[in-house]
């Protein structure tokens, strides 16, 4: 299936069995055994992982120098034999690539790009600057290496186009309605810490008219509160049409506290008069990582009986 432009965005060609998938490490280094296990899982799904030996280099806590990481990323986009790019892991360091990244080169070679966590800085910029649909989902040495670390239905719907992309959660599931309502808009977002770190730079996220997905890991409730307030004071909630929080892994209040993280979130966003849901397991998760197509137009329905997020064709 060729790449297409819909709703003002460029959606890359779908994956098929036998496709070559480039593996990149734009941020932190990783454990080799997790990398190898992820490659085994990719092959079982019918893909051929492709990577260079330099991906195993280390520089402090990075996967090699910024120059190495930048060259690797741009080369994978430009190679005609590579149909998709999956990040090995997040961590920290993708922001080093932003000032030197040739966004026109990326836009000229649109293809599937998958990652989360620190990779949020890249997926956000690819979408805002190049109009490229990216994918907030499983990484090689963080999820594919784990048994049942990848939510295969959403992966196949998002990347292989087997069915229209849709995730739905019934009442009583892990996803909770915090503010009922319905909305439509382009899906954006990612790791809260990275979104906040982008503010005041040339690469800060654009949220106006969009459905915003927010997730993080290992962050205390008051820190979540502070970052949400930072986004609010920066005007990033002013034009959003809906908000979906992730699983927020290891962000719960300590034992003995009488408040919940949901209450913390709603103290900040409860006056926006938009639908709000909480708990969608994409990004930093304990179980199967759901794939979200960032940059497509979606509808969000938050009701008493179900929460549904689906792509609008």
Image (spheres, grey):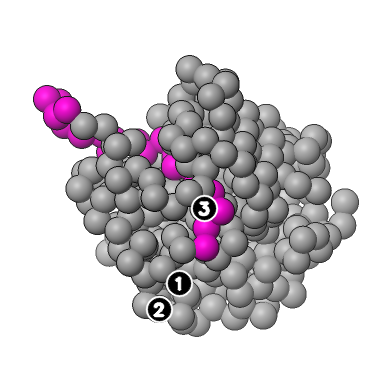
Q: Quick one: SS at disc 3?
A: strand
Q: Which quarter of the figure has residue 61? A: bottom left
Q: CA distance from mark 2 to mark 3?
A: 19 Å
Q: Which comes sooner in the sequence, label 1 or label 3?
A: 1
| Residue toward you, 303 or 52 | 303
Q: Main secondary structure of the magenta part?
A: loop
Looking at the rendering, the stretch of residues picked out in magenta corresponds to 239-258
Q: Which residue is mark 3?
A: 212
Q: Position of residue 190 (x, y in %)?
A: 47, 53
Q: Which residue is mark 1?
A: 204
| Residue toward you, 305 or 52 | 305
The residue lying at 41 percent from left, 68 percent from top is 235
Q: CA distance from mark 1 to mark 3?
A: 14 Å
Q: Residues within 10 Å of mark 1 (few under 14, many from 20)?
A: some
Q: CA distance from mark 1 to mark 2?
A: 6 Å
Q: Position of residue 69 (x, y in %)?
A: 48, 68
Q: Residues within 10 Å of mark 2 (few under 14, many from 20)?
A: few
Q: Position of residue 228 (x, y in %)?
A: 33, 55
């Amino acid at each position: 299936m060729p790449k297409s432009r819909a709703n003002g965005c460029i959606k890359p060609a779908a994956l098929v069995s036998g496709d070559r998938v480039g593996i990149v490490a734009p941020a932190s280094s990783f454990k080799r055994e997790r990398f190898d296990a992820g490659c085994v899982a990719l092959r079982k799904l019918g893909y051929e992982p492709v990577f260079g030996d330099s991906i195993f280099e280390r520089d402090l806590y990075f996967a090699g120098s910024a120059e190495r990481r930048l060259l690797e990323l741009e080369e994978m986009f430009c190679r005609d034999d590579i149909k998709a790019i999956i990040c090995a892991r997040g961590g920290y360091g993708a922001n080093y690539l932003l000032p030197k990244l040739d966004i026109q080169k990326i836009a000229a070679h649109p293809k599937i790009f998958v990652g989360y966590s620190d990779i949020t800085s890249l997926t956000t910029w690819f979408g805002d600057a190049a109009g490229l649909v990216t994918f907030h989902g499983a990484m090689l040495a963080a999820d594919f290496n784990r048994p049942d670390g990848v939510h295969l239905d959403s992966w196949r719907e998002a990347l292989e186009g087997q069915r229209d992309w849709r995730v739905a959660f019934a009442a009583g599931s892990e996803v909770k309605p915090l503010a009922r309502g319905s909305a439509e808009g382009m899906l954006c977002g990612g790791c809260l810490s990275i979104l906040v770190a982008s503010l005041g730079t040339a690469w800060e996220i654009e949220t106006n008219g969009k459905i915003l997905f927010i997730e993080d890991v290992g962050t205390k409730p008051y820190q979540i509160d502070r970052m949400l307030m930072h986004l609010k004071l920066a005007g990033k909630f002013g034009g959003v049409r809906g908000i979906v929080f992730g699983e927020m892994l290891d962000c719960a209040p300590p034992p003995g506290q009488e408040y919940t993280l949901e209450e913390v979130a709603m103290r900040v966003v409860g006056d926006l008069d938009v639908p709000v849901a909480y708990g969608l397991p994409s990004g930093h998760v304990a179980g199967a990582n759901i794939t979200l197509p960032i940059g497509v137009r979606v509808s969000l329905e938050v009701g008493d009986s179900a929460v549904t997020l689906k792509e609008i064709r």
